[in-house]
Image (cartoon, grey):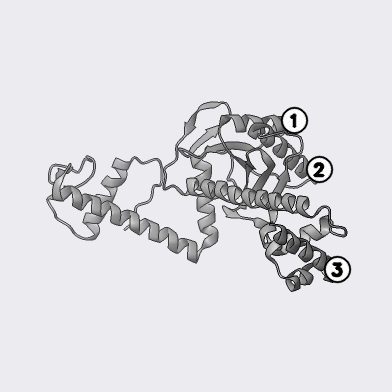
Amino acid sequence: MEIKKKLDETDEELLQLAIIEIRQRYQSHSKEIYIPFPVELGDDIKIHIPKSGDKKRILELSERNAKYYRMERFKQAKIVDPERHQKRILAQMKKDLRLPEEPVHIECFDNSNIQGTNPVSACVVFRNAKPSKKEYRKFNIKTVQGPNDYASIEEVVYRRYKRLLDENASLPQLIVIDGGKGQITSALKSLEKLGLRGKIAVIGIAERLEEIFYPDDPIPLYLDKKSETLKVIQQLRNEAHRFGLSFHRDKRSKDALDTELQHITGVGEKTITQLLKHFKSKKRVSEATFDELVSVVGVARGKKIFTYFQSQEGNS
């Protein structure tokens, strides 16, 4: 049996209603009831609130069973009616994150650099709480020298939403920044310049304690670790990490290959891009057979690249 909140009933009121309904439905005349907190049931029923021992374990088992039942119901709803499931998650996110509207369109930003080299940023897009991978975007950092997370966020947020405004494209209802107050402040500077501050909700997620930060609020929000809202935000953050690191790795490989092959006549930017697209890393290019290289860049360039790496091997 499931009891749903209809108004703003307290936990005590809901439990009281549930006990009365269960007793009526199953014609129970039990004189004793074990419950987690006190409720008013009249003088005919003896209430126990166990603190330890077997009765406490029975109560905990009942709570686990109820949570398992609820979880299974959610899973079934997701399979049978995914649209309804999505709407429920979006409504929950709106409530949990104190948003003015449901976050149907969310974008999350993350910066990537290792020891300050090849700084890049990633923007991932979720629609209806699901990844929309065709809308993911990569950014090479152009205006920032060295590892500066705040300035990098300011740059990419400005570039992203300047472009969406220029293209008259739809804007997200929520922007998630991987970081805390400093990163949010940087993002808000760019939104201010574009006249978008206050028109798009912005939050930050700090990884260590999974704290949710808001602009102009010094106290972070802590969501239940099992909440679906937190799971969606974590998935956004993790997806932005993955996408950003993948782009950063590709960029480092390309720069290393550029340096390695730049003095070979006939091997230019287009050839290097083709090699990396196929082989994924400089190491795999250097280990490729003659036939493998030819199949990607043709006989002439394949021969030059193969000969180059063979000679390097001979010199090492």
Residue farthest to the right, as pictured: 266
Residue 193's label in the rendered image is: 1
Note whether residue 140 is visible.
yes
| Between discs 3 and 2, the one toward the N terminus | 2
| Between discs 1 and 2, the one toward the N terminus | 2
Task: Please tell me whether mark 2 sits on a helix, a strand or a loop.
Answer: helix
Q: Nearer the viewer, residue 128 or 35?
A: 128
Residue 21 as seen in the image, left or right of residue 70:
left
Q: What is the three-letter code of the residue carrying label 1?
A: Lys
On the image, the x and y values in percent for residue 204 come to 56, 37
Q: Which residue is mark 2?
A: 166
On the image, the x and y values in percent for residue 135 come to 69, 53
Q: Which residue is mark 3?
A: 300
Q: Nearer the viewer, residue 97 or 180?
A: 180
| Between discs 3 and 1, the one toward the N terminus | 1
Q: Residues within 10 Å of mark 1 (few under 14, many from 20)?
A: few
Note whether residue 20 is visible.
no
Q: Quadrant of residue 108?
A: top right
Give the CA separation, mark 3 to mark 1.
Answer: 51 Å
Q: Residues within 10 Å of mark 3 (few under 14, many from 20)?
A: few
